Every structure is written in structure tokens, then in C-alpha cells.
Amino acid sequence: MESMFRSVWPVLLLVAAFLSVGCESADTRYTKHMGNAARYLAEGELQGAILSVKSALAAHSDDPAANKLLLECYLERGTTEPARKLVDALKKGLPDDDAVGLLEARVLLLEKRPDDALELLAGYMGVHGESAAALTIVGDGHADKELWAEALDAYDRATQKDAQAARAWFGKAAILARLKRDDEAAVAAAKAVAADPHFGRGYLLQATLAEQAGDRKGAVEIYRQALKSDQRVELPARFGLAQNLLALQEVNDALTEGKQLVKEFPDAPHGHFIVGVAHYLQQQFDDAVTDLQTCLAKAPNHAGAEFYLALAQYQRQQWEQALGAAKGLQAQHPGVKPVEMLIAELLLRTGDPKGAEKQARSTLELEPESAFLYRVLGAALIAQGDGEAGSEALEKAQEFAPDEKLEFALGDLYLSMNELDKASTRFEAAAAAHPDERGAQVRLFYTRLRQKDFDGALGLIATLLEKQPGDPMWLNLKGAALLAKKDKAGALAIWQEVVASHPELVAAHLNLASLYQKDEKWAEARTEYQTVLAVKPKHSVAHRQLAVLDLKEGKLDDAIGHLEQSLESVADGQVAMALAAARLQKGDGAGAAVAADKATELAPKAPAVWLQAGVIALAQGDLKGGEARLRKASELDPKSAAVAYHLGGVAAAQKRWDEARGQLQRAATFAPDDPTICQRRIAVELATDAGAAGDRIAADYLQNHPKQLAAYQLAAEAAEVRKQPERARQILDQGRQTLGDNLGIVLLQADFERRQGNNEDAEALYSQILAKEPKAAEVIMRKAQAEMAGGRFEEAAKSYESVLALAPEEPVPLNNLAYLYSDVLGQPDKALELLGRVKAEVVAKSATVRDTLGWAQLKAGKVKEAVATLAKVAAEQPAVPAVRYHHGAALIAAGEVEAGRAEVKAALEIGLKGTEAEAARALVEGK
């Protein structure tokens, strides 16, 4: 009985505990929820406050305090209708409650009835006297009526009665800011947030005043404080933060804030606008157009979105769309100078020079000294055939903007047209007119380099150095001229001098690093690029070039890291392509696909980018996506052999044979000397049992390329696949006669004989190669395989040892030699020693190596370890007969006879062959 009581007692305690929770009193629940509501309201979490108050009312319905708190929430949220219903109910239920009168005054202000509110407050204060709360609402009423002096007086009286009256300080600050008394406004706003650290509107006003004072960094910090302090102002605070980040050119951070706005307020235009502008500034114009159009769908009259949409479409050279957006903005806000100026140029771009002339002339009335407009006007007049008037307009542009240097623009135009003499003349004139303008000198210098006037370029630099001895910019350019003149030693000395005296000059470090790379001085180049990053940690070129060096040294993870940094700094399609290739090399196919698609976004008109994206998608098994990307590449470059080759492969994979033939024929037309295209054409014919057609393709290729090793390989392989070994042998003999001492043809012969089972002939041919190339590890490997196939195990072991002398950590010869030692030569301990040299990551990834390891463990008497090793391999590769046999043999040795025999039987059933099959049958029969 006692034991029974002990077993029941814990259950009773649990039941009592649950009952006590369920029996929490209504008073307790009320107190808890009211406390939560007050805290939520103070912190600006209105939704949480409202839910908590309603939970309190569920415990005590019609509670006056709870209803007043709920009304406070409605007032803070600005919801008029529920606030009116609740205050009317409170007036009826609590006719003598002083607080209800003040709440009703606030509701009246919410309803835009300031006169009624002020009348009510006059009566209230006549009875109850002036209080800080009442005076604050009086100030709000006068402010609504724009009676600034009366409002300020009321707020001052409120703060005199209660120095912690945050809303009164804020009301005063808002009016002072409106009256442009910004210093006084800033003091009042600071007192508002000091009185109530959760008063978000106070922070917003402080941030606005900081913006107006030009302190954008200060505004950023204040907006961040607002976000931490008051959830009620998240939308305006995050929007203001993002706008200031954009103004500070902190575009990535602004983009992050914009995306958060989209997430938190998906129906508001604010986030889409910020994201669109950020994408525009990052030169991701396609994304910018999408984002800004989304913004305009939510706010059709959003002037900023219209303007940036026009700019983004302008950058995409979508002149008509840009013009439409700009005119839409013009209709809403006529006379805005940037918009009117943009329309003038867009009319010119869209082939309407007459309209551009008219627009430029009318806008010049708004901006009569605009060089930009005079340039548009000049171009429009010239386009209409009035060269004289056009020249006058251009001269006027030069008059109003001498610092914009029309000579530079014309020089740049001639450079783009490759009219170097004209460009040089313009830059010489610009340099003479503006001798202190470095841009003119630099343009003239590079023009002379393009003219191959190296002495002229050096002469220019010498003149500049006479005026400014030791100037690092001119010295850096002198190095470039010396290198162009093939004086590498001179360039090296100059750049070393510059980086020693001016280590902050990034251009000199980059030039020096590039020179080191050309001389294959990889360590020195790395040092220079790292120095650049010490000066500018986000320098895109330095990260990109370090990635090149990392790839050269096999540091794949480091290379990927540098490419990611480079891409983050500057959105560049070529960098995204390199990142895709590096990730693919690492085995990160999904990451490679993401980077490849990013490259197509950044360089949508580059066929090579679409080609790479297509190939990576195919590697991921995405035939549909790969084909779509390849077809885009084909649209951009219809004569690309590589694109046609891969499209042919896609068609073949889907057994669309005629299409595959057509694409591969196109590829062969564009690249008739490419053997891989021929190989795929042959494969298609063999796959469709059209062997004769495959033979003809191979024969034609061989006829056209009798000196190309691959031609003999393709023809021989086609014959071999069609079970015509003698013809294959004749083709290879013909290649031997034609190519003479080419060891490649001998290797093809050797491999062919090995596949045919003629191991002694294969060994002899491999030996011929090794007599001339004794360190050809791959050839020694193949010779070892022939020796093993021919039963010459001792010789095979020696061959594998020779390979390992050349490549001590190469896993394939280590594995094969270990298998020989454990299975044939009876030296399992030596096999285990060899396998111990295989890198752990290779062992982890290679089931073949772990199978050999388990077999060696079994042969060495380490049965328990063998069972553990081989069980995992068998689970991974249940369809490999040798693996199942090895696992079964280990189980039998461990005493698990039935399970072991079942594994061995399975191995025989799925095709175990050779001497291992004989040994397996013996195990099954218990011999």
C-alpha cells in the first residue's frame, strides 16, 4: 500500500500544479495585462499594448482604467472612429471623471476640430485649473490653427508646470523648426527625448534638424536611436535613415534598410523607392526599373520614383520609356529644372531635334546659364542642319562652363572614334588653356601612348616633373610610358621609388604588382596587392588579382573569398563569372549557379556570360534552365561554336536527334578544327545506330586534319565502338606513320591494345614512351594497369612504386598498390602503411579507397575494424559486387556467418567476376 501511495503522489502533485495555473484569479490576470499594456505603450509597441488591454478587459469588463488606456492607444495610433466610440462610452459611464475631458479634447483634435477642442479645454481649466497635460493639448489646438505665438505660450506654461512634459517640449520644438528657429528647436527636441526616451517623434525632429544643418552622419545616428526606442516611428525612421545613407554614398547599408522596409511594410512605397535608388546607384539598372515601377504602382504620384525611373531607363538606353517617365513627372510638377533638362536631352535622343530645340529654349528661361542646355541646343540645331547656330550654342556652353571644358569632351569624342590626331590637338589646347588641370595632362599623355608616341609621352612627363619635382602621379605615369617603350627595368625602378615614397598611392602599387605578375614574381605581386588592401580594404581590382594568385597556388577558398569581396565592392560581370567558375571547381554547384546568374544580371549583353551560366545549369542537371540560358547566348552571338556545341548536347540528352545534328553541324561550321565538336557529332550518330554516318564524320575530319592527333583518336574510337578492332588498329598505324615521333599516337596505340586485352603489346608500347619520357607518371600508371591485367603483379607493384616516387601522395597509385599488396602479394601491413599516406579528406570522399582499406584490414587480421569500414562502404555502394563480397567475407571472419554469406551471394547475383567470384563461391559453400 505504501509503495502504491508513493507512485500516485507525484501524479497528484502535477495535477495540482496544472489546476493552480488554470485557477489564476481574474484580478491577477488583470494586473498582469495592464502592466504589460502600460509597458508596451511606453515603448511604442501599440499592437502589443492594445492586445494586452483587451486581455485585461476580458478579466474585468468595462474597467475604466483599462478603457482609458485603450483610448490612449487609439489616439497614439491615430484611429479616429474607435477613439470616438470609446470616449463617448467613457463620458456616459464616467460623467465626473476629469481625465475623460482631456481625452475627449485629444479626440476632437484627431477629428480636425481644434475650435471645439479649445472650447472644451477652456471650460475644463475653468473648473479644474491649468495643468501641464491640459496646456499641452491647448498648444496642440493652437498649432492646428497655425496660431504659433499662442501655441508657444501654451507649451511654455506646460513645461513650467512640468519640466518632464515631453509632448509639450516636442510641440514647442516642432513650431520653432517651422519658424526656422532651428537652434532653439534643437534644444526643445532634446528636452523632449530626455523627458521621454521612448518618444520617437522627438528623435525624428532631431534627425530632421541635423539633416537641415548638413550633419547627415548625425542624422543617421539619431534615426538609429529612434528605431531602438519607439516602434511607432519605424517607417519614417527607417526611411529617413536609408535616405541619409544614400546621401552619404553608403549604398549597401541603404539597400539593407530598404529591403527591411519592404519586408516590414510591403504595401508602402517607401522601401521599394529606397531599394530602387540603391540599385540605380549600384548601376543595376534593370533591378532599379523593377523596384521603382513597384513603388509607382503603390504611389502613382511619387515624384522621386518617377525621376529615378527616368534616369534608370536613360541608363538602359530606353529613351522612349525614359521620356515617358520624365513627361509624367513634368505633368505633376511642371517647371522642375532637372526634369525639364532631362526631357530636352531625351527628345534629342529619341530623334526629335526640333522638339529638343524647343524644350531647351524654354528651359533656358528657367536656367539661362546652363551649359548643359546650350549643349543640347547646339546638338539639336546641328542635327537640323544649322551648323552655324549650333556652334554658337556650343560656344555659349563653353562660356558658361569653362570648368566643364568642352575641349575635353570633344577630345574624348575623338578618342572614342579613334581619331587620335584630332584628340591630341584638342587635349593640347585644353592643357595649354588650363595648365594646372591635371585631367588635361593625363588625357594628353594617354593619347600619345595610343599614338605610340612614347618619346612624346615621356617628354610631357619630363616637363611636368620640372614644374613639380617628385610628384607621385607624374612619376607613376612615367613608369607606364617606360613600360610601353619596353623598358621594364626603368618602369620597375620608377614604381618602386613611388611606392617607397608614397605608399598611399594605390595606382603605383597596382602597376608594380602587374609588372611582377608578368615576370611571374607571384610573392612580390601578392605583397603589392595586399598593400593596396591595407590602404583601401574594399579595392575591387586588388581582391580580383589576389584571387588570380590564389587560384594559381591552389588556394580555392581564399580565391572565392577575394572574388566575393571584389564583387561586393564593384558589381562586375567578369568577376561574377570568375566566382562561378571557382565555386564550380570547389564542387559548390548551387553557389556557382547563383554567381553565374548574377553575372547575367550585371552583363546581360555578354554572350560569354550566358554561355557560362548555361553550362553551369547543365552541370546541375537543370536541362531546361541550361537550354534557356544557352539560347540567350545564341541570340547575342549567333555564330558561337561553343553555344551551338552545348545546345547540341542538350538536344542529344533529350533524344531530339535531328536538332542535335543541326546544332552540332552549325558548331562544326563555326569551328571546323575543333575535335570535341567532331567527337560529339560521332557520339550522336553512334547513339542512334547510325554508325556508318559516324564513320563518315570521323573519316572526313581525319582527311581534313591529317596532322592532328585527335583526328586519329576519333576515327579509331569510332571503329572500336563498332567492334572493328582491325580497322581501328590500321587507323592508328597510319597515324604512327604520319605523325612520326609524336608520343601521343604511341599512347593511343598502347591504350587501344590494353583495352583489347593485348597486355604484352600494350606494355611494350608504354615502354617505348617511357624510354623517352621516364618521368611520365600517367604512362607508368597505365603500364601498371596492363601488367596487372596480364597477371604480372610484381612488375605492376614496381611500376606503382615508380609512380609514387614521382607523386608520393597521389591517391590512385597508393590505392592500387595497396590492393595488390593486400590481395595478391600477401603484404597487408604494407598496404595499410600505403593507405595511411592518403589524405584524410580523400579517404572520406572515396569509397574505392575505403573498400581497399577495409580489405587490407581484413587481410591483416583486423577483423573488427574491417567490418566497420566495409559496412559503411557497402551501405554507400550496394550495387558494386566487389564491395558486397569484401563486406560479406569480413562478416564471416567476424563470426556473422549467415549475414556474411547473404552479402557474398548478393555479390555473385549482381555480377561478381574473375578470381573473386571463385573465392566467393567457396565462401558460400563453406570451404
Image (cartoon, rainbow, N blue to C red):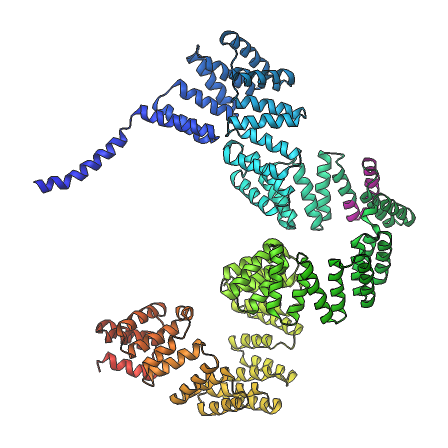
Looking at the image, residue 585 sits to the left or right of residue 349; the answer is: left
Which quadrant of the view contains residue 625? bottom right
The spot of residue 56 in percent (x, y) is 37, 25
Residue positioned 60% across, 72% down in the render: 664
Looking at the image, residue 737 sits to the left or right of residue 371; the answer is: left
Residue nearest the viewer, comparing 816 with 444: 444
Q: Specify whether residue 659 is in view.
A: no
Residue nearest the viewer, comparing 499 with 78: 499
The spot of residue 154 in percent (x, y) is 58, 16
The spot of residue 874 in percent (x, y) is 33, 70
Q: Which residue lies most toward the right here?
A: 388
Which quadrant of the view contains residue 515? bottom right
State the extent of the magenta-drawn residues as a range.
345-366
| Quadrant that contains the N terminus | top left
Q: Is residue 270 above or below residue 426?
A: above
The spot of residue 780 in percent (x, y) is 48, 85
Q: Is 573 inside the magenta-drawn segment?
A: no
Residue positioned 72% across, 34% down in the render: 333
Q: Is 364 inside the magenta-drawn segment?
A: yes
Which quadrant of the view contains residue 698? bottom right
Q: Specify whether residue 26 is in view.
A: yes
Q: Which residue lies most toward the left here?
A: 1
Q: Main secondary structure of the magenta part?
A: helix
Q: Which residue lies most toward the top here?
A: 127
